[in-house]
Amino acid sequence: MNKSRIFKLLFLLVFLISSALRLGLALVDRDSNDVIDIILRQNRLPVTNECEECFQPKLYYYFAAKAVEIVNINLNHEGSIALALQLMNFAAGEAVIVLVYLLIKELDAHFEHAGVIAFALVAFNPALMATSSWTENDTFAILFSSIAMYTFWKYLRTNGVGWLAVSGLFVSISLATKTNTWSTALAIILILLIKALFDRRLFSTLAAVIFTLAVPLLTLLNPLSQYWTNIRQYGSPITLNVSPEPFPSLFEKTYVRRPGIISIQDGFFTFKFLDLLQSPRLTLGATDYNPFRTSFWADIYGTANSLHFFNSPDSWHTRPDFETTRSIFVLALLPTVLLVLGCILGWVELLKSLISRSGDLLRQRYFGLFDVVAIGYLLSTIALALRYRDFSTMNAKYMYPGILAFIFLFIQGAGAFYKFLSSRTRLITILFEVAIFLLIVAYSMDIYHMIIHLYSINIL
């Protein structure tokens, strides 16, 4: 069997096993959705202050409610409605994984190992698994944003105007699904402007201008985004159901609601990894919380790598199984370092091409598309944490609409790592791949334990 066939089988095996876990999780959860319930029972779109998630744009919720009506589910059968919605999100999650595969395949990385590892880490990622099993809008926001990014990447490679049009459509759809996808929209607009500046062609300039005007206008006029409704009722297109808090001090610790960011230094210049290992699960109250909860990086790391870490919603509360979570947190340091390495290498290359004004280098870097998207989602999540300071705002899932960017940068970091190892002992490479395999096994155990827990309380 040749090497190419082996890698194809590995991709297929990863997809099938991860899909089984994703489906299992979707089948056993039963959390309802208040937004969809209001749409179904009152045949209208709720506004910000009517329920916990009513501040969200309504495109996903509206079409999810219509799907429930089409299959004629009894409105009093909340469990059946939840199951239908979770299966929709399962399908969207599968589509995201397929899109990740297409990106990896088309990148044609020199080190196939890096591609398989990247695919496996995404396919088994607990945070992505969780969003694929809930009745919320996260998975569709990730899907629509990823399609927008993927088709825009195709446009940058081919200059095909059809790809740009599809990208613009899905950017607008994603903005009407979840507001954090503005990071994708703004990144694409910035890349179009950079491209126009370096191309110095009328077509590139027109494309940038039309996209910049058309996408926000389409989003504003879309009644399912509720941006115009929000402007009229609340004075802002984007609303939230909590009030912003005073900006934190640099060093002095101040406390609000459920900390959260208590100071700039404590929140953004700490990781508190040892505290994370000691008791690797969030406590949700305003007091008596673990020290790592006020560290932005610890919360992002935890929510990205374990289903059990966030300890919410209520039905997801489980008895502590810290050994699996601890194992994940130790092993996940390896891909995290490679992702950071990829980000650093990417920005070095991008800045070098901008300083040298080399259009060819910029095109090879896709005008910095993935670099800008990644930093955009990071900065927007930091801004959210600073503005509201509640620990719930420090969640990795808010960055997942930029998942293709993080995959691209991880592959770059992993490729550089494999290149470094190629001239050294094979043993280090084997140990690294064994550690990644153990991480995937630990991810699977984390997910399987949650499936068993939800099955015991919702199905038995």
Image (tube, helix red, strand yellow):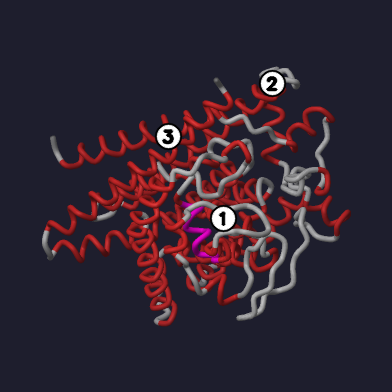
Residue 324 or residue 435, whichever sits in front: 324
Which badge, 3 or 1, comes first in the chain's sequence? 1
Residue at x 51% of width, y 72% of height:
200
Can you give x and y, in whole percent of width and height, for residue 293 in the image? Answer: 56, 61
As measured in the structure, the alpha-carbon distance from the residue carrying label 2 to the one carrying label 1 is 34 Å
Residue 205: x and y, percent? Answer: 58, 67
Residue hosting label 3: 448
| Residue density around tag 3, few if under 14, some if 14–19, many if 20 or more, within 10 Å | some
Q: Which mark is residue 71?
A: none
Residue position marked by numbered label 2 in the rendering:
70
Question: Dot 1: what SS?
Answer: loop
Amino acid at dot 1: Asn
- Within 10 Å of disc 2 (Cα), the crowding (few <14, some 14-19, many 20+) is few
Give the Cα separation between the discs numbered 3 and 2.
32 Å
Asked if the residue under mark 1 is in contact with the one under mark 3, i.e. CB atoms within 8 Å, the reply is: no
x, y percent for residue 121 = 37, 47
Q: Is 415 or 4 nearer to us in this picture?
A: 415
Cβ atoms at labels 3 and 2 below 8 Å apart: no
- Quadrant (top left/top right/bottom left/bottom right) for the N terminus: top left
Residue placed most toward the observer, 414 or 286: 286
In this rendering, the label closer to the viewer, 3 or 2 = 3
Q: Are marks 2 and 1 in contact (CB under 8 Å)?
A: no
Q: Mark 1: give few (<14), some (14-19) or many (20+) Cα within 10 Å.
A: many
Residue sitting at 83 percent across and 48 percent down? 49
Which residues, given as a range, are shown in magenta?
295-304
Q: First in sequence: mark 3 or mark 2?
A: 2
For discs 2 and 1, the disc positioned in front in the rendered view:
1
Q: Is residue 231 shown above or below 442?
A: below
| Left or right: residue 255 compared with residue 11 | right
